[in-house]
Image (tube, rainbow, N blue to C red):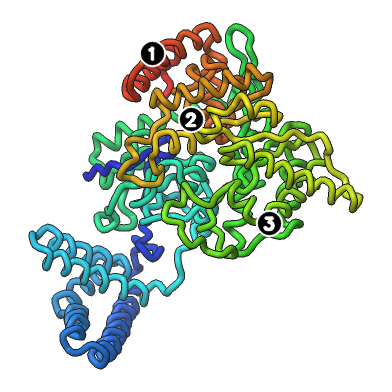
């Protein structure tokens, strides 16, 4: 058994068979052969070795001509390893005697060889391990083909282990079959983590290099609550986690009974429960969990998945489908919230050494007004289908907000002149996610109709922590007292100005913080649909008076550790069976 610690980004526990995707996205399957297929599979392995050897030889000749024999000797060594009689004999034996597929045999044997070298001291030996991994990749390319694994085509229950998954790859996952995933890289708050939470599957990221330790088909546990990946668990560990999975299932059934009940505290205060979505299809998840509306519709994926700038009609079709599906429930659409480095159709910024502090979100939109206007026109056109609200992200100054509103006013004027219908009285709001916005709230209340606190970015900018950097991920926490005080200041200022304020982001979907947030004065929470039932359950189990006491005590604490411990104790007193 091997326990690997990563970063928990989506809660829950899953147990199952692993699919391992290497750096290039190749799937290394654990597949067994029928007896009559063995001969042909050995021939297939021989062909792969011969083709790989020829490929290595071509590289050797080219490098010898360009750089000399010393450099070309690297490839001579690779060819020698590929054709090592002992290696061939071992691979063929696994295929013949154990009926392993050639891919699985190659992965098992070469990874075992590499581990032996990795365990030896000295950089030379470590380089030898890299050579063996390189040979494994060459053979797998020949055996599996060049195509990267398409996660949307997986049709049996598995746990995906990969170096990294892009947000669009994560979005293509069918939660019915991919029960959880873990990656070597990544950090909390990344888009991949956000999408995983939206899908409601356990996920752990930032585990570090571990794929070489696992083969496809092995039993793995992914604990999205504790950030653990357990490879080849022993019987005792398996039994404990199976009990945990059973408990989660029974709790999920209990939570489903709350679907049509209001999120009302024991002293009769209603809390609005809203859903965060990435794609129009996620509206179904909101409705299935009884959401009062969509509190955050992230529109970035229209830009990320198409490869080119979306047209106004493409924007409109996506927005209109969400509005129609939500009926008379409110929908808050956030305008583009990406960095320039993520949009290939735009010029690459010349000096973007710190993307999180650079040309992104509302700054990017105001830099490319035509692109911004296109999106706003589509949103305005979709506003005729229900109650749409427009929200600007990463506003840090009053001037930025006023410029954004001017572009919106221009778009409205254009549509009016063209005779295109839209809701002339739709609400306009802004995200509160940088400290400057919090400090200027008394001025912003005069300019907008509503606010939403974006905790993912607020934590990042308040604590100066890159949320995608696993080396500092331990500093990234909503429990930091400075973050909680910024939230309190925001809520107090919005209430003083008579403007509604909600919270979106991962903090609002974590039941650990629900009592604190209600005690600070929040009455609208927007979270991934999967998180809504647990948060609603806390709301229906507690009074506002008790929440205010919890908030008052929390504000006196000095460290994130103290805050977390205290909130855990309080939640455990309220709901002893709630997973923490």
Q: Report the residue at 40% width, 49% height from top.
A: 159
Q: Report the residue at 43% width, 73% height from top.
A: 146
Residue 33 shows which numbered tag? none
Q: Which class describes the residues within 10 Å of circle 3: few (<14), some (14-19), or many (20+)?
A: some
Q: x%, y% of residue 420?
A: 88, 49
Q: x%, y% of residue 4?
A: 26, 44
Q: Indicate which disc, 2 or 1, sits on the residue closer to the N terminus.
A: 2
Q: Is residue 236 above or below residue 416?
A: above
Tell me the element at label 2. Answer: helix
Q: Can you identify the residue that label 3 sits on?
A: 371
* Viewer-side residue, 81 vs 526: 526
Q: Is residue 580 left or right of residue 176?
A: left
Q: Is residue 357 left or right of residue 96?
A: right
Q: x%, y% of residue 405?
A: 72, 41
Q: Quadrant of the N terminus?
A: top left
Residue 556 shows which numbered tag? 1
Residues under labels 1 and 3: Cα distance? 46 Å
Q: Quadrant of the C terminus?
A: top left
Foreground: disc 2 or disc 1 = 1
Q: x%, y% of residue 104?
A: 30, 65
Q: Is residue 136 above or below residue 423?
A: below
Tell me the element at label 3. Answer: helix
Q: Report the residue at 38% width, 66% height from top.
A: 24
Q: Which class describes the residues within 10 Å of circle 2: few (<14), some (14-19), or many (20+)?
A: many
Q: Indicate which disc, 3 or 2, sits on the residue closer to the N terminus.
A: 3
Res. 284 in view: no
Q: Indicate which disc, 1 or 3, sits on the residue closer to the N terminus.
A: 3
Foreground: disc 3 or disc 2 = 3
Q: Can you identify the residue that label 2 sits on?
A: 507
Tell me the element at label 1. Answer: loop
């Amino acid at each position: 058994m091997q326990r690997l610690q990563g970063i928990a980004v989506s809660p829950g526990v899953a147990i199952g068979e692993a699919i391992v995707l290497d750096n290039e996205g190749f799937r290394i399957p654990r597949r067994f052969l029928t007896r009559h297929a063995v001969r042909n599979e050995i021939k297939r392995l021989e062909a792969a070795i011969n083709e790989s050897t020829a490929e290595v030889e071509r590289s050797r000749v080219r490098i010898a001509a360009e750089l000399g024999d010393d450099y070309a000797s690297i490839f001579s060594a690779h060819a020698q390893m590929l054709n090592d009689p002992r290696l061939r004999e071992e691979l063929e034996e696994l295929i013949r005697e154990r009926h392993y597929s050639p891919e699985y045999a190659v992965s098992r044997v070469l990874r075992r060889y590499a581990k032996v070298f990795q365990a030896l001291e000295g950089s030379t030996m470590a380089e030898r391990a890299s050579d063996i991994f390189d040979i494994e990749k060459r053979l797998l390319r020949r055996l599996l083909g060049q195509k990267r694994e398409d996660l949307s085509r997986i049709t049996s229950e598995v746990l995906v282990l990969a170096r990294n998954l892009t947000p669009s790859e994560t979005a293509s996952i069918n939660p019915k079959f991919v029960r959880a995933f873990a990656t070597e890289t990544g950090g909390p708050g990344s888009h991949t983590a956000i999408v995983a939470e939206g899908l409601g599957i356990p996920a752990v990221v930032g585990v570090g290099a571990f794929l070489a330790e696992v083969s496809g088909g092995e039993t793995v546990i992914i604990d999205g609550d504790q950030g653990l990946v357990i490879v080849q668990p022993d019987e005792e560990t398996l039994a404990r986690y199976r009990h945990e999975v059973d408990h989660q299932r029974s709790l999920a059934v209990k939570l489903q009974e709350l679907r049509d009940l209001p999120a009302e505290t024991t002293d009769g205060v209603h809390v609005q429960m809203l859903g965060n979505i990435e794609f129009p299809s996620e509206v179904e998840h909101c409705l299935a969990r009884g959401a009062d509306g969509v509190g955050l519709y992230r529109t970035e994926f229209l830009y990320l998945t198409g490869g080119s700038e979306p047209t106004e009609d493409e924007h409109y079709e996506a927005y209109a489908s969400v509005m129609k599906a939500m009926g008379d429930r409110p929908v808050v659409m956030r305008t583009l919230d990406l960095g320039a480095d993520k949009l290939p159709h735009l010029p690459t910024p010349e000096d973007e050494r710190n993307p999180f502090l650079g040309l992104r979100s509302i700054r990017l939109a105001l830099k490319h007004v035509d692109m911004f206007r296109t999106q706003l026109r589509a949103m305005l056109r979709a506003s005729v289908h229900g109650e749409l609200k427009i929200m600007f992200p990463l506003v840090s100054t009053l001037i930025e907000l006023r410029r954004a509103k001017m572009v919106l006013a221009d778009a409205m004027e254009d549509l009016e002149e063209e005779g295109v219908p839209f809701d002339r009285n739709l609400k306009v709001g802004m995200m509160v996610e940088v400290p400057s916005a919090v400090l200027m709230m008394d001025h912003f209340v005069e300019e907008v109709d509503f606010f939403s606190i974006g905790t993912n970015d607020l934590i990042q900018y308040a604590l100066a922590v890159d949320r995608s950097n696993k080396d500092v991920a331990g500093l990234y926490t909503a429990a930091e007292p400075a973050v909680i005080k910024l939230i309190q200041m925001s809520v107090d200022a919005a209430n003083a100005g008579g403007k509604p304020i909600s919270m979106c982001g991962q903090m609002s979907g974590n039941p650990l913080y629900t009592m604190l947030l209600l005690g600070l004065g929040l009455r609208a929470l927007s979270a991934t649909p999967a998180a809504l039932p647990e948060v609603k359950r806390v709301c229906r189990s507690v009074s506002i008076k008790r929440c205010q006491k919890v908030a008052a005590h929390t504000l006196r604490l000095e460290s994130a550790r103290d805050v977390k411990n205290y909130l855990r104790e309080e939640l455990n007193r309220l709901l002893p069976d709630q997973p923490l």
